[in-house]
Amino acid sequence: MSAMHARPSPLPLRLDGVSFAAGGVSILERVTLSLGAGPRTVILGPNGAGKSVLLRVCHGLLRPTQGKIAWAHEVRGGPRPDAMVFQRPVMLRRSVRANVEYGLKLQGLARGERRRIALARLEAVGLAHLADRPARRLSGGEQQRVALARAWALEPAILFLDEPTASLDPAATRMVEAIVLAMHGAGTKIVMTTHDLGQARRLADEIVFVHRGRIVEHAPAAKFFAGPSAPEAAAFIRGELPV
């Protein structure tokens, strides 16, 4: 059993009345949300709704202007219980394997153990044969799979994904989606932003619909797509930009 699974789950992650403003502009307004273990959560909404900012606040990259964020169980001094993958991942100027090993090195794992875990995760994302290649020479889809392997190596309790396939072609998108499903199957909570309705239908167990910095609907995916209760969400599904 891994160290992550040996300790109590830090989930749910709870947001209570969280707001965020920058430059005098309100981006999130009084968001209350509980992200528990289990269902794949897709944060859906039009561009500019505040989806990416919401993820960054959850991950600790941005500090809320108001409100509180708290884990159910927090281990002080230990590794973060979450990881995040961005739309355009940053590759370190080193090999693919070294990119995946980087976070494990920061956690103090021995070299042999880092190598074993990194190669296992690269095998899982179909890139073990490129382990020694410079990561920055890979295609965009391959780099995104390296980013997923790097996150998976840390065994996060929750993985935040910010539009991870927005820059990818359909084949690369399907590969990334398959990896996301595999990570969920291995026990990682998935929280993902997208404005792609097809992707949301494929991946979501529950939908959090964001409009103008507010959560206007939070429902099981099947119920949401059968008929959302919020007029803004219904307009979005019809292909109309909510106003």
Image (cartoon, rainbow, N blue to C red):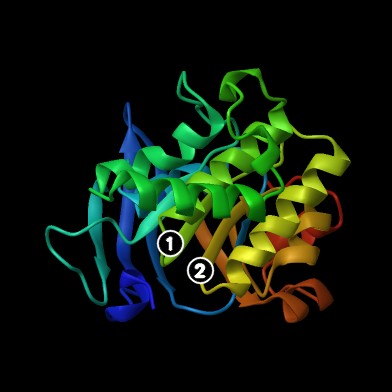
- SS at mark 1 in the image: loop
The part of the image, by quadrant, that contains residue 9 is bottom left
Residue 188 circle label: 2
Q: Nearer the viewer, residue 18 or 144?
A: 144
The part of the image, by quadrant, that contains residue 4 is bottom left
Q: Which residue is drawn at 63% across and 38% down?
A: 144
Of the residues under marks 1 and 2, which one precedes in the sequence?
1
Q: Nearer the viewer, residue 122 or 55?
A: 122
- SS at mark 2 in the image: loop
* Residue neighbourhood size for the residue with mark 2, other residues' Cα within 10 Å, grouped as few (<14), some (14–19), many (≥20): many
Q: Is residue 216 above or below residue 120?
A: below
Q: Is residue 44 left or right of residue 95?
A: right
Q: In this view, does 127 lie above or below 69?
A: above
Q: In this view, does 9 lie to the left or right of 66?
A: right
Amino acid marked by disc 1? Glu
Q: Tell me the distance, in whole angstroms, between the alpha carbons under discs 1 and 2.
A: 7 Å
Q: Is residue 225 left or right of residue 42?
A: right
Q: Which residue is drawn at 25% across and 67% down?
A: 70
Q: Is residue 181 above or below residue 227?
A: above
Residue wearing tag 1: 155
Which residue reaches farthest left? 77
Across and down, in percent, residue 229 comes to 70, 75
Q: Is residue 224 visible?
A: yes
Q: In this view, does 239 lie to the left or right of 155?
A: right
Across and down, in percent, residue 1 comes to 39, 78
Across and down, in percent, residue 136 comes to 59, 20
Q: Which residue is drawn at 65% across and 59% down?
A: 180
Q: Residue at x 53, y 79 (%)?
A: 38
Q: Is residue 50 visible?
A: no
Q: Which of 173 and 115 is in front in this view?
A: 115
